[in-house]
Image (spheres, rainbow, N blue to C red):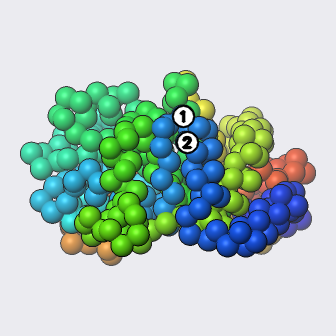
Amino acid sequence: MKIPFVDLLAQYKSIKEEIDQAISDVIHDSAFIGGKYLKTFEQNYANYIGTKQCIGVGNGTDALFLTLKALGIGKGHEVITVSNSFIATPEAITMTGAKVVFVDCDIHTYNIDVQKIESAITSNTKAILPVHLYGQPADMDPIIEIAQRYNLHVVEDAAQAHGAEYKSKKAGTTAPFACFSFFPGKNLGAYGDAGAIVTSNEEFAEKARMLANHGRKEKYNHEFEGINSRLDGLQAAILDVKLKHLEKWIERRRAIAKIYDEELKNIVITPDVLPDVRHVYHLYVIRVKNRNRIKEFLAEREIHTGIHYPIPLPFLKAYGYIEHKPEDFPTTYLLKDEILSLPIHGSMSDDQVEYVIKQLKIAVNRL
């Protein structure tokens, strides 16, 4: 049995008529940049998240960069983020001219260790950028409390957390500003690169929207220099169709995660979930000894897995200039050799889930 890590074709086939009609409508109306399809999705996504504004942009990395830029963060400033994430998070910080400051992750949730944030704050710190990793929100209450005490901005990197909740609040509403990616493999994914900024701060939203559109509100009237990062009409229309199905897909992911939890709890280390949190399982990440050999064993049986992430951010060549050592991030360094992402998606069948479980148990017992 072949088990893909993500099955975007199966997802497309399940909503083919809706997707094809949406694409046809955009082409018929030639509404490729801006237009009603973008506005409709932005409004619907803002309503779903629970914010006043959604600004569609080119991708999730741009969403982070534009948010930090709109907040006035740049050269001479520092932004704190977690050491266990995708490079887009720190990349967006350095794109503004600011310095990235890494903090180790928590051994249970793999999100930023809130106990270590305060010691990383200096007179140059301007913001904290927590990541809702794998679909579970970071522990936001203490982060917000620290930020308020030191007069810092908080920006949520919710690129993996569409529909996740923290104490009954949607990811994207626990801080004043949040950023999403709609990369195809995400829980809510486009058919290309796409992203969004959400906020209820109208003044900020206007500035961010202008920054993403060459620093203008209207054609040829550029009030300042910005960049070109716009969510196009085709992707907006596709996302608007998928948004209607998102909750169904999330609940399927959560059902699969529950099966994994029950069947694997005594076999591997399964994910810990914070109280009062809705984990949406963009990734289902276990910890296991002999990880590489087990990954190979599963691959031989056509079960595709992932490692998120094999090289911790502070130890990437891109950040070699900071000269971090493994002892600076002991938890992140430990996890890099144990974490393994199992297949999980809204189109996955019970038979496929059971096959993954069966083969993983065999692998753990043999290896």
Asked whether disc 1 touches disc 2, contact meaning CB atoms under 8 Å apart, the reply is yes
Give me the residue at 76% from left, 71% from top: 28
Structural distance between the alpha carbons of marks 1 and 2? 6 Å
Give me the residue at 32% from left, 44% from top: 203
Q: Name the foreground residue: 226 vs 62.
A: 226
Q: Name the foreground residue: 90 vs 359.
A: 90
Residue 193 percent across, percent down from the top left: 57, 68
Question: For residue 77, which quarter of the picture?
Answer: bottom left
Looking at the picture, does residue 253 appear above or below residue 61?
above
Give me the residue at 25% from left, 34% from top: 147
Give me the residue at 49% from left, 37% from top: 51
Residue 128 percent across, percent down from the top left: 29, 45
Residue type of the residue flagged with mark 1 = Gly
How many residues crowd around disc 1 within 10 Å: few (fewer than 14), some, or many (20 or more)? Answer: some
Which residue is label 2 attached to? Answer: 46
Count of numbered labels shown in the rendering: 2
Residue type of the residue flagged with mark 2 = Ala
For the C terminus, which image quadrant?
bottom right
Residue at disc 2, secondary structure: helix
Residue 13 visible, this angle: yes
Residue 138 visible, this angle: no
Which residue is label 1 attached to? Answer: 50
User: Does residue 359 appear to the left or right of 178 in the view shown?
Assistant: right
Looking at this rendering, what residue extends furthest in the bottom direction?
Answer: 317
Looking at the picture, does residue 65 appear above or below residue 252?
below
How many residues crowd around disc 2 within 10 Å: few (fewer than 14), some, or many (20 or more)? Answer: many
User: Does residue 235 appear to the left or right of 334 in the view shown?
Assistant: right
